[in-house]
Structure formats: structure tokens, C-alpha cells
Image (cartoon, rainbow, N blue to C red):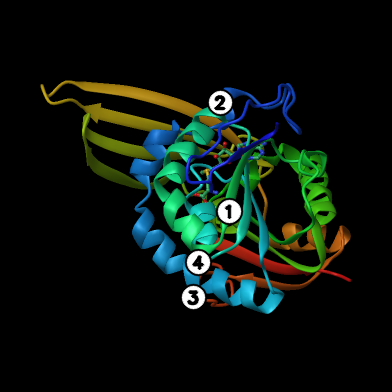
């Protein structure tokens, strides 16, 4: 089986197929910026989901969403929220450690999901591998939190978006959310403000440092984590992740090329229009009938 059913009272965990759809030699462990547990510590989930929920509710109501695919779902926090809204969610991610954390998070939410009449399945797959999962057509697909820049170049983007179009029904919605690459490139932003968290392992400091190696085609993200343990000693770990630069106009162009239309370019989950200084970009589109 390719899915892990996390909505049943006793979540059934199934074996992950190897190779998983969309995974090939280009997906390396280094594609995943921070270990899954760290990612859940870095993000203030309750605040983030509260801030983002109204936009999802608006788009899902407009598109009549009862089945949804979340690609690059990470630790499945969004997927769980949607399943708790009664939606049938397929959460897809290529990284085993993210899926393992997703399973823990989903198991904790299983009763709430069941009570809401939702369901959540976890799948191991990457961009380009969705159609091969053989899911029923979705009413919406989301790809949030800067997962999309892992597509591996413009060709990879085209493959990923064509795959999105294959799995979303006509009239269905797509929501893409990532950092505003136009701003990063224009201002050559070198660092995202550090985040400090108190954890059971001690104090963690999350640093994200960017380099622009090839004149605007890609962005190197160094994710550096400093940990001060309870004895006061510091350790440093780091991972580099190569992101494809994806300015919003290119995304809009490529979405249209694979059959999405009515594209909204937003600068925040409050629905404001995208501006040059916005930190993030959100694209909302509908698959043409
Ligand atoms: C920063 S997390 C975002 C998680 C979540 N969507 C969010 O909004 O917080 C980026 C995710 O992209 C996933 N990812 C990396 N390469 C990918 C690929 N080729 N296809 C799909 N997802 C990928 C990672 O495993 C990771 O879970």
C-alpha cells in the first residue's frame, strides 16, 4: 500500500513503496532543510494556522472542496487542520523524517478528524509523482511553506505543475505559497531573522542564510541550527538546500501553460494584492474546465 491512513481510531501505518513516485536520484536527503522535529519547533503552528486559515476557508468554499491534496506537506499540520474541517486529505511528502513526524501529529489528531468526518492519508512521493499515486481527482491542491522551490529548475517546475493539473478536477483550485523570490533577488537578502526556541534539548537558534550563486536562477539556503544544551555547551548543525528561483510572474505564466486560470497574486493570507516588499507570495488559481 502507498498510503498511511491516519483518520481511523487506530491509525493503520502501511509500508512505503520504494521507489516512491516522483523520487529519483535528484531527490537527496539534503533537499530537506531541517529535521522534521526541528521544523515543528521552528514554526509557531497555532499562530500560523490561525493566520492562514481564512484564506483557505475562502478558496475552499468557492471551489466546493471536499477532497484535497497537500504536496510537500511536511509534518502535515495544514493537512490535519483541513481533515479536522471534514475534508478528505492526501498529504504527500518525499522525506521519511517529515512523514514520521506527520504520523505522530496525525495520530494525536485522529479522534478530532474522525469526529469531523474527515480523513487523512500520508503518501511518500515527490513533485511529478502525484498522478502515479492513482488518487481520485482532487477539488484542490496546495503546496505551501516554500516547498515548491525544491522543483529542480524550470523544467522541474513545468513537470510539477503539469502533474498538479492532472490530479485536480476541472474547476478545482490550486494554492501555491512560497517566499517572495523577486524581493529576495532584488534586495539580495542574506538572512531571515533568527528564531530562538526553548526546547527539551535546550535553547535552539534557527538561522537561515541565503546565497545567490548563479545570477538569479537559484538560491542557496543554508539552514544552520545552534543548540545550547542544559550544561551550556553549544553545537552547530547545518544543511544546504538549493532552491529554484521562482518569481511570481514565472509561476503565473507556467500555471497558465498547464491549464490554470483566474490567477490571483497575493502578498499575504489576508488576501492583499502582492507588493514588491511582501515577504511571501501566494498564488490562487482554478483549473480551467
Ligand atoms: C519547509 S517544508 C514545508 C512544509 C509545509 N508545506 C508548510 O507549509 O509548512 C518543505 C517541504 O518540502 C518537501 N520537499 C522537498 N523536496 C520535495 C520534492 N521534490 N517534492 C515534494 N516535496 C518536497 C520537504 O520534504 C519538506 O517537507
Whether tag 3 and tag 1 are in contact, CB under 8 A, the answer is no
Q: Nearer the viewer, mark 3 or mark 1?
A: 1
| Ligand 1 contact, mark 3 (Cβ < 8 Å) | no
User: Element at badge 1?
Assistant: strand
Q: What is the quadrant of the N terminus in the image?
A: top right
User: Element at badge 4?
Assistant: loop
Q: Is residue 216 above or below residue 254?
A: above
Residue 195 appears anywhere in the view: yes
| Ligand 1 contact, mark 1 (Cβ < 8 Å) | no
| Ligand 1 contact, mark 2 (Cβ < 8 Å) | no
Which residue is depicted at the point 35% across and 58% down? Answer: 46
Q: Which residue is labeled 1 in the image? A: 119
Whether tag 1 and tag 2 are in contact, CB under 8 A, the answer is no
Q: Nearer the viewer, mark 1 or mark 2?
A: 1
Q: Which residue is labeled 2 in the image? A: 30
The spot of residue 160 in percent (x, y) is 77, 45
Q: Which residue is labeled 4 in the image? A: 277
* Residue that sits furthest to the front in the current view: 9
User: Which quarter of the rendered image does ligand 1 occupy?
Assistant: top right
Q: Which residue is labeled 3 in the image? A: 270
What's the CA distance linking mark 4 and mark 3? 15 Å
Query: Which corner quadrant of the image does residue 264 belong to?
Result: bottom right
Which residue is depicted at the point 41% across and 40% down? Answer: 39
User: Does 45 sit left or right of 30 as displayed?
Assistant: left
User: Does 193 sit left or right of 116 as displayed?
Assistant: left
The spot of residue 209 in percent (x, y) is 44, 38
Q: Nearer the viewer, mark 4 or mark 2?
A: 2
Amino acid at each position: 500500500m502507498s498510503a498511511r491512513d491516519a483518520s481511523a481510531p487506530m491509525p493503520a501505518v502501511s509500508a512505503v513503496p520504494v521507489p516512491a513516485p516522483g523520487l529519483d536520484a535528484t531527490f537527496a536527503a539534503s533537499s530537506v532543510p531541517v529535521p522534521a522535529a526541528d521544523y515543528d519547533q521552528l514554526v509557531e503552528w497555532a499562530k500560523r494556522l490561525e493566520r492562514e486559515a481564512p484564506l483557505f476557508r475562502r478558496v475552499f468554499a468557492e471551489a466546493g472542496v471536499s477532497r484535497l491534496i497537500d504536496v510537500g506537506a511536511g509534518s502535515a499540520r495544514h493537512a490535519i487542520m483541513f481533515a479536522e474541517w471534514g475534508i478528505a486529505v492526501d498529504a504527500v511528502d518525499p522525506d521519511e523524517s517529515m512523514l514520521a513526524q506527520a504520523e505522530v501529529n496525525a495520530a494525536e489528531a485522529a479522534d478530532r478528524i474522525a469526529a469531523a468526518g474527515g480523513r487523512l492519508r500520508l503518501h511518500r512521493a515527490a513533485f511529478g509523482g502525484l498522478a502515479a499515486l492513482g488518487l481520485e481527482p482532487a477539488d484542490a491542491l496546495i503546496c505551501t511553506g516554500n516547498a515548491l522551490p525544491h522543483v529542480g529548475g524550470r523544467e522541474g517546475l513545468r513537470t510539477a505543475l503539469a502533474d498538479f493539473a492532472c490530479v485536480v478536477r476541472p474547476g478545482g483550485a490550486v494554492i501555491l505559497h512560497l517566499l517572495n523570490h523577486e524581493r529576495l533577488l532584488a534586495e539580495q537578502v542574506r538572512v531571515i531573522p533568527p528564531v530562538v526556541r526553548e526546547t527539551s534539548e535546550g535553547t535552539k537558534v534557527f538561522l537561515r542564510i541565503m546565497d545567490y550563486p548563479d545570477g538569479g536562477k537559484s538560491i542557496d539556503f543554508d539552514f544552520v541550527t545552534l543548540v545550547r544544551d542544559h550544561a551550556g555547551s553549544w553545537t552547530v548543525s547545518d544543511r544546504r538546500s538549493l532552491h529554484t528561483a521562482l518569481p511570481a510572474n514565472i509561476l503565473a505564466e507556467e500555471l497558465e501553460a498547464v491549464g490554470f486560470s483566474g490567477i490571483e497574486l497575493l502578498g499575504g493570507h489576508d488576501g492583499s494584492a502582492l507588493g514588491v516588499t511582501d515577504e511571501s507570495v501566494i498564488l490562487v488559481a482554478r483549473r480551467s474546465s
